[in-house]
Image (tube, rainbow, N blue to C red):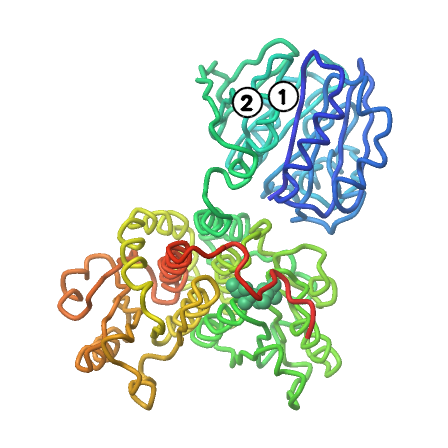
């Protein structure tokens, strides 16, 4: 999730407008930034690693004397944070900024290299600049962009300039956001309205497969099929902060709602359903070693630890590899038995968690093969592991991890298929898992339709001081994650427990003031879960059940309140079941008046032991 800005107009300070826009978009990514401004048909590009202030130091007099330009603040996906990987990317007279992922960039890059193109970055984005440049040999700028769109696959918002047509700027949107601001002196376009509202409250929201051609005076929207499209201008009613949150009250809520795209981005370009294969570029170098590993140890903390527990169930059941999950903070204080046939996987959103990093260093020291499942590209864990898979979830601003979790689970599904297919997982099973994984973004969206019911339940249970979160098999880790969320956000004491284990002691806590949230999807342990519900009810405890759609009426006989989730494969239910639990925690925290984005005593990234 990067931030992009473009400006074209009559004002003479494009550089200024773009820098200001980038600062407001920095929450979308901040590992490097860049700008390309035009003065007549001459372009000037500046790039810097780090925050926008570093770029600002370089741009000098080009803040003014420029009437058009594009700019980018990066959250790395392909290629580490560096000056050469920073946008804008250029080829010949074409310059562009990109937010999204070009799925087929490798194959396009190979073709373009054969035609003599020389690449200077490791990014997927640069390929688009070369493609447009290639088509510009025989076409004007607009035709070249249209031609390139036929070739690229993936998610992208692009803003492009050509020195051959210096009075024109072209932008496209497909599955990545782009908003046009219509100001008195020109047009500002950006990934979200926070970079626009200081100039104008008149905006046009682009839809997927739309292309816009700007001149300093006017703009025209076309569909990818080339038809003109009328777009209604709307009036923005947000302030700066609301615009960053895209109208959501908190980053946490925004990030919960971003999960359909976080899951889609995690699997984008990594699935070959017809062959039942997961294509994981980051593991290519260790593919042979992975074929030989006999054991997996997952090390992680907090929410990432809960993701690891789900991974354990998946990897053992479907890839047939013995797997253990360790709190990273414990790992190096005992004597972990690691050898070269052991893969040690660090799961970390930030890639900077000190405990996880120390565990990976210890594992390396003992000769294990280290892998990372990391969201922050170029972070220390990503750099220090032998190989890994990036989440591509974009920055997570809310301290409580939400979209990073579902994205981690998606990667663990891909890893299970990858390792399983190296072993004895059948083609049919590979296809079944991957095609169902593909459907999850839509299924997560369906859960949001039940938002009012979830909010009602959250409000009802906020008064209790303690709660159980119970689940079995794949959903035991989700019970732990649900309990962690409600603890962090609403400061309600909660225990995440295996539902079958509860009767061995904790059940003593149950009374009318100690409710339980129970994960009860229609899976292979459903009947056992019903028994746990009965045990709680018999002791006067209240129950909120999370069950599979269609089962509501039946489970209502046992539970006080019910939330439904769509049907999916048992191994994938955690990706759906966690969503209502995140919302329950969020609404409970809001109801109690807490700052849910910055809960007390917590930090987003725990870089101390
Ligand atoms: O960045 P990491 O995934 O390594 O962070 C691990 C934990 O600190 C993190 O998940 C923490 O538990 C979150 N606050 C959970 O919401």
Residue at left offset 46%, top offset 69%: 484
Dot 2: few (<14), some (14–19), or many (≥20) neighbours within 10 Å?
A: many
Q: Quadrant of the N terminus?
A: top right
User: CB under 8 Å between callouts 2 and 1?
Assistant: yes
State ligand 1's quadrant. Answer: bottom right
Tag 1 residue: 170
Q: Is residue 488 above or below residue 88?
A: below
Residue 147 can be seen, yes or no: yes
Residue 418 can be seen, yes or no: no
Q: CA distance from mark 2 to mark 1?
A: 7 Å
Instruction: Give the image location of residue 459, x and y in percent.
Output: 30, 57
Tag 2 residue: 211
Residue at left offset 58%, top offset 22%: 146
Residue at left offset 48%, top offset 21%: 223
Q: Is residue 261 left or right of residue 395?
A: left
First of labels 2, 1 by sequence position = 1
Image quarter of residue 167:
top right
């Amino acid at each position: 999730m990067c931030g992009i800005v473009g400006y074209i107009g009559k004002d003479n300070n494009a550089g200024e407008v773009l820098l200001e826009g980038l600062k407001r978009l920095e929450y979308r990514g901040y590992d490097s930034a860049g700008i390309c401004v035009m003065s007549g048909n001459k372009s000037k590009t500046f790039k810097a690693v780090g925050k926008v202030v570093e770029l600002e130091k370089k741009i000098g007099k080009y803040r003014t004397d420029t009437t058009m330009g594009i700019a980018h603040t990066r959250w790395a996906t392909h290629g580490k944070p560096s000056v050469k990987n920073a946008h804008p990317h250029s080829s010949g007279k074409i310059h562009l900024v990109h937010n999204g992922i070009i799925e087929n960039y490798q194959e396009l890059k190979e073709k373009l290299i054969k035609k003599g193109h020389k690449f200077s970055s490791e990014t997927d984005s640069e390929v688009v600049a070369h493609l447009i440049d290639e088509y510009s040999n025989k076409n004007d700028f607009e035709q070249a962009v249209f031609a390139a769109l036929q070739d690229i696959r993936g998610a992208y918002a692009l803003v492009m300039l050509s020195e051959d047509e210096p009075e024109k700027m072209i932008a496209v949107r497909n599955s990545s956001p782009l908003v046009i601001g219509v100001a008195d002196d020109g047009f500002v376009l950006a990934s979200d309205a926070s970079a626009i509202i200081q100039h104008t409250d008149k905006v046009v929201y682009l839809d997927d497969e739309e292309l816009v051609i700007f001149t300093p005076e006017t703009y025209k929207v076309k569909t990818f099929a080339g038809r003109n499209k009328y777009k209604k201008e709307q009036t923005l009613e947000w302030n700066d902060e609301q615009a960053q949150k895209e109208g959501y009250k908190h980053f946490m809520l925004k990030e919960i709602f971003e999960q359909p795209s976080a899951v889609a981005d995690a699997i984008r370009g990594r699935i070959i359903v017809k062959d039942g294969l997961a294509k994981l570029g980051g593991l290519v170098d260790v593919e042979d070693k992975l074929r030989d590993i006999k054991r997996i140890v997952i090390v992680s903390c907090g929410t990432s630890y809960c993701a690891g527990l789900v991974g354990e169930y998946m990897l053992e059941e479907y890839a047939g590899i013995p797997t253990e999950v360790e709190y990273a903070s414990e790992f190096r204080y005992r004597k972990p038995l690691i050898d070269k046939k052991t893969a040690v996987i660090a799961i970390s959103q930030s890639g900077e968690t000190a405990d996880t990093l120390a565990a990976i260093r210890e594992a390396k020291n003992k000769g294990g093969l280290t892998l990372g499942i990391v969201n922050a590209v170029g972070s220390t864990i990503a750099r220090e592991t032998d190989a890994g898979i990036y989440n591509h979830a974009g920055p997570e601003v809310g301290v409580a991890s939400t979209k990073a979790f579902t994205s981690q689970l998606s990667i663990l599904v891909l890893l299970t298929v990858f390792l399983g297919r190296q072993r004895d997982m059948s083609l049919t099973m590979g296809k079944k898992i991957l095609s169902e994984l593909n459907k999850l973004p839509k299924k997560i969206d369906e859960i949001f339709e039940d938002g009012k019911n979830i909010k009602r339940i959250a409000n009802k249970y906020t008064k209790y001081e303690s709660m159980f979160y119970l689940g079995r098999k794949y959903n035991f880790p989700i019970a732990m994650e649900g309990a962690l969320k409600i603890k962090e956000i609403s400061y309600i004491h909660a225990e995440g427990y295996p539902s079958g284990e509860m009767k061995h002691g904790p059940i003593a806590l149950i009374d009318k003031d100690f409710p339980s949230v129970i994960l009860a999807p229609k899976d292979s342990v459903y009947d056992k879960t019903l028994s746990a519900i009965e045990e709680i009810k018999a002791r006067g405890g209240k129950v909120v059940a999370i069950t599979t759609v269609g089962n509501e009426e039946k489970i209502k006989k046992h539970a006080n309140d019910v939330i439904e989730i769509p049907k999916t494969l048992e191994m994938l239910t955690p990706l759906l079941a966690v969503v209502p639990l995140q919302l329950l925690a969020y609404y409970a925290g809001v109801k109690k008046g807490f700052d849910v984005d910055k809960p007390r005593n917590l930090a987003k990234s725990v870089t101390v032991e």
